[in-house]
Amino acid sequence: MSAMDINQILQHLPHRYPFLLVDRVLEIVKGERITALKNVTINEPFFPGHYPHHPVMPGVLVIEALAQTAAILSFQSLGDKPDSKSVYYFLGIDNARFKRPVVPGDQLILEVAITANRRGIWKFSGTAKVDGKVAAEAQLMCAERTIE
């Protein structure tokens, strides 16, 4: 699949407003990589408090957007979709670096590649860019777990 609209994304992520942080998938190569985008607008619920005088998207939410992008790649690679009996958890975040602030009006391009998948533990390399410049990057580790 070369692209996904918001309706397809909603089928592959359990997240909903205000925590859904992926607006469109631009390209996906199952088992390898994905490129998605998040349109950052002043209407985001976190901007009134972060910071009222100079709105900046929290870095942890940029990393969360990368993780949601990684989850889409995982589900697409497995030919699976989330259900009410499982959840996709963060297991680790390594080497997170923030290079520039993300502000209202930016279009965040989310690039994620699979670096390993062993026994249901997925490792990814993620980069978030604005205007071709790195805003944040991190190594992510995630796994799908059954809800008891």
Image: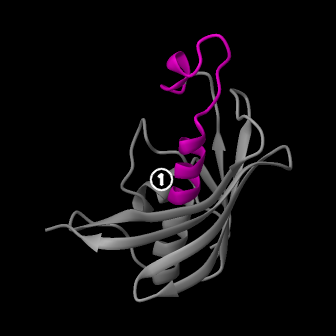
Q: Nearer the viewer, residue 7 or 102?
A: 102
Q: Is residue 86 left or right of residue 132?
A: left
Work out whether residue 32 or residue 94 is closer to the camera in this orientation and state it. 94
> Which residue is pictured at 43% across the width and 41% down the height?
19
Query: Mark 1 falls on what kind of element?
Result: helix
Going by the numbered disc 1, the residue's amino acid type is Asn
Left or right, residue 70 beside residue 145: right
Residue at 60 percent of width and 45 percent of height: 62
What crowding class fits label 1: few (fewer than 14 Cα within 10 Å), some (14-19), or many (20 or more)? Answer: few
Residue identified by numbered label 1: 7
Side of 145 relative to 71 (left or right): left
Q: Position of residue 71 (x, y in %)?
A: 48, 65
Q: Quadrant of the C terminus?
A: bottom left
Position of residue 8 relative to residue 49, above or below, is below
Q: Which residues are magenta?
A: 44-68
Is residue 18 highlighted in magenta?
no
Q: Position of residue 38 (x, y in %)?
A: 63, 44
Residue at the far right: name it.
132
* Outermost residue, left side: 148
Count of numbered circles on the image? 1
Magenta-drawn stretch contains 50: yes
